[in-house]
Amino acid sequence: MPSPIEDYALISDLHTGALLSRDGSMDWLCFPRYDSDSAFAALLGTEDHGRWLLAPASSESGAAVVGRKYVDSTFVLQTHWRTDAGEVLVTEYMPVGDRRASVVRRVEGISGRVTMSHELEIRFGYGSILPWVSKAHDDDGELLLAIAGPDALVLRAPELPKASGHSHIGEFTVEEQQTYDMELVWYPSHREPPEQVDVDQTLKDTIGYWQDWGSNCIDRGRHDAIVQRSLLVLRALTHEDTGGIVAAATTSLPETFGGVRNWDYRYCWLRDAALTLKAMMTHGLQDEALQWRNWLLRAVAGDTGDLQIMYGVAGERRLPERELDHLPGYADSTPVRIGNGAVAQYQADVVGEVMVSLEKLRELGVKEDHFSWPLQRALLTYVEENYDKKDHGIWEMRGEKQYFTHSRVMMWAALNSGVRAVRDHGLEGPVEKWEELQDKLHTEIMEHGYNQEIGSFTQTYGSTHVDASLLQLPQVGFIDYDDERMLSTVRRLEKDLVLDSGLILRYRTESGMDGLAGEEHPFLACSFWLVEQYARSNRFDEANALMDKLVGFCNELGLMSEEYDTDKMRMAGNFPQAFSHLALVRAADAVHGIKKDPKD
């Protein structure tokens, strides 16, 4: 049975990532990319769906984890085990910078004599494909090969595990000052196995990369440590070569345990990526923003009329959603899905998020090239051509399309960015037409998106329901944080959506608007938006109290999922979640009094 979500650690090589439980089980790993098929899928099922366990043997009495941490400012994980017979330190990482799709696990003896066990169960194809496993030799020694179709894995270790049914199990003993290294490497099965790695060198290089990158983050305020960790998470979810930013490392971790709201987040949402870049740019990470802009240009290239809300890591367009019936799901939450049907949705807010982020890049002095500004003009044409269309909204509702107030505001924000590009930066475009449409949208939103009777902006035109996405209205400059209409909207949100815990729901699922059964837990990003609203409207005590509570939901490694179950005090949803971490950065900046851009 998989561990609680909060018990997992992420290690990453900027191409993919593995999740390791507190008890030493690697329960999720997709090679060679985040959106590739998994080799270990025990996270969504059982050990029979693939995992790699490394922990003190069952014969070791008193075995316990007495400490777990990342080497400072890295994704090199260290776990300190203690048994009655001795202590060991397990260091686990994915080498960065060598284009080698691998995981390294090192066991070092601290004291005494500890017998360690490792159990390897490789299952390609999300736990459905049993590979052919055999032993072989090369110039570096004996190795264990696992091959199925296009995928192959090779394990190198001083003592290889032995076959036991469809698993491989082994034990080895580590004494004080003794080191035991093992590496599992993926490679295309038609090629020769990669050569043995120099663990000392790759460990040094990997630590060096992460620490160098982390040192470039501009840290300010009392939440420096968790802000830096959040920025590191955002970097870990960014593909080193393509610049694509995945929304999370996992698929189908449930929003409600035992429920059906289980989605694949291993793709690049334009919205999430754009917001990620705003968070990074505020902290001095301009190069990543420029890399993502180039990814965007490639992904969207062609007819902007075919714009999608999300793409694959390299800009792939076809992401068909299907269900994996052979997997029982995390905590029996089915269906398990891969792909995402929302790829075909029209979400009117997306262009606004992209345009606002590219404006921020422009304000930092990055010049538009021969492609980037023409693309932005094409995106504004897309806004014009789709002006009258209803959409599915930011939360990807699977019910009827509506005029969502947030979506209409983000269309306004897209036009506003275009106007500022011409007026403030001297770029060319039909600015008078954009200004006319922008003014028209503002009038329309105030007439239909603000309900005078209840004194609040509303989720959709003409309704009385509210939505946490309304907290983004002042974030893009549509209205001031302390405007009475915004303050009254906040009061309505507090009345209708804020729980006794102080956390806020995205919306009331019982309205049936999203077309799905069941409920969900508070979406952490929305609660961070509420922190920002409190801070920007001078409710500092409430902002700090809520911020401290939310930061307390991070696990001991500083990682957050999508949602939080306040009754059971546990994380829910995909993990780690970019949206949660980028919203944390924004909220921390607001609490610290840091201006994010001229519109704030």
Image: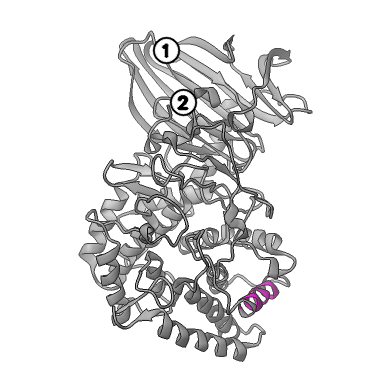
Is residue 189 placed above or below 355 in the rendered structure? above
Instruction: Name the image quarter holding the C terminus.
Output: bottom left
Is residue 50 placed above or below 250 in the rendered structure? above
Residue type at mark 2 is Ser
Residue at 72% across, 13% down: 137
Q: Quadrant of residue 363?
A: bottom right
Q: Could you tell me if residue 50 is visible in this image?
A: no
Q: Is residue 95 magenta?
A: no
Can you identify the residue that label 2 sits on? 25
Tell me the crowding category of disc 2: few under 14, some 14 to 19, or many 20 or more residues within 10 angstroms, Cα based. Answer: many
- Which colour assignment does the render follow? one colour
Front-most of residues 472 and 408: 408
Relative horizontal placement of residue 342, taking residue 596 as reference (left or right) = right
Q: Secondary structure at mark 2?
A: strand
Q: Quadrant of residue 155?
A: top right
Magenta-drawn segment: 374-383
